[in-house]
Amino acid sequence: MAKRKHAFSLLLASIFLSFSLLLVACSDDGSSDETASSDDTEDTASSAEEGDSTLDTVKERGNLVLGGNNQLPGFGYVNEDGDYEGFDIDFGRAIAAAIFDDPSAIEVRPLSADERFTALQTGEVDVLIRNTTWTTTRDTDLGTHFAPTTFYDGQGLMVRKDSGITSVEDLEGATIGVETGTTTELNLADQFRKLGIEYEQQVFDDSDALVAAYEQGSVDAWTTDKSGLVSRQATLSDPEAHVILDETLSKEPLGPTVRQGDDQWFNIVKWITFATMEAEELGITSENVDDFLDSDNPVVRRLLGDEGELGAMLGLPNDFAYRVIKHVGNYGEIYNRHLGPDTVFGLERGVNSLWTEGGLLYSPPFR
């Protein structure tokens, strides 16, 4: 009996071994190697993609690609020499200065309001700084992160002085022009519905087309952020023939925007922006920044990189803020250069003043 059991066990073992060898032989037809190779390639590509931070990409490319505006004097436009300049553009130059010690290491990609978020989401641009309003939807559905607000604004309306329109209520039955892909469409609808005002809306692809239609009389009024109204009024054939209504239709916090998924890059853009505000609060400018080197003030020393490793924590040189201030200036310098009293716009700082002067600008500690 024992012998028969032993023989039966040997037979089972033999059958199992033969079946296992057959399975191996059947699977060894070359396809498994190709599949494994393909999987390995996909895993490598996935790992490479995950490992390529925005900072790495920017450094390897050798410049920053900024999604900007080319139709808004004071904020983002092309000057007579064919160069981009403006308040928003300078915050892009600040990022380039921090990374490359060169504010000109930047390519501005002009984007319409309708295409700006797609360009950011797909990686066509590294950062979007184009008079863009921070909203809940843009933080969630669009998958973006907003760096600190650089300009607190509000939506307004422009009309002709001789129209007899002096308030929003006077726009009953009027045709109002708006730019597509902006919060202005929704804000206009919300406010006029609340007030019970009937109006016709005419939508345009970009601000140039909108302003041209307004000047030609195709629309009775047009709406955008008040800073934009001030900016474009200066370019009209007869600026004095137009007026911006007193009413403010909305809150419009504008600032740099990055896509979600790269916390390091978000922190970089955020703290570079804060550095311009902190510098103004400390009285450090592009003209006197060298005098602050080796300061006895520990707050100044940390900001300029004389002490601590704040830059290294961000993946930047420790003197990144010094580079920003030296090449581009503090927040006040940037504002005055493009929008201040010595410009055609002459915009008062108002809520865009430092918190120490009654405004909303406030930098967390550089510590």
Image (tube, rainbow, N blue to C red):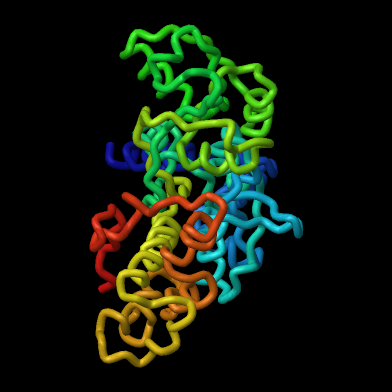
Q: Along the line of sight, which residue is nearer the eye, 285 or 301?
A: 285
Vertical arrangement, residue 303 with respect to residue 42, above or below: below
Examine the image and state in which quarter residue 270 appears: bottom left
Q: Which residue is located at x 63 percent, y 27 percent?
A: 210
Q: Is residue 30 left or right of residue 324?
A: right
Q: Along the line of sight, which residue is nearer the eye, 60 or 69?
A: 69
Q: Which quarter of the image is occupied by the C terminus?
A: bottom left
Residue 360 appearing in the image: yes
Q: Can you give x and y, in whole percent of width and height, for residue 77 in the image?
A: 64, 49
Vertical arrangement, residue 261 with respect to residue 273, above or below: above
Q: Can you give x and y, in whole percent of width and height, for residue 272 in the image?
A: 42, 65
Examine the image and state in which quarter residue 117 appears: top right
Q: Can you give x and y, in whole percent of width and height, for residue 299 in the image?
A: 26, 79
Q: In this view, does 140 lie to the left or right of 316?
A: left
Q: Is residue 140 left or right of residue 175?
A: left
Residue 36 appearing in the image: no
Q: Which residue is located at x 60 percent, y 48 percent?
A: 73
Q: Which residue is located at x 67 percent, y 23 percent?
A: 213
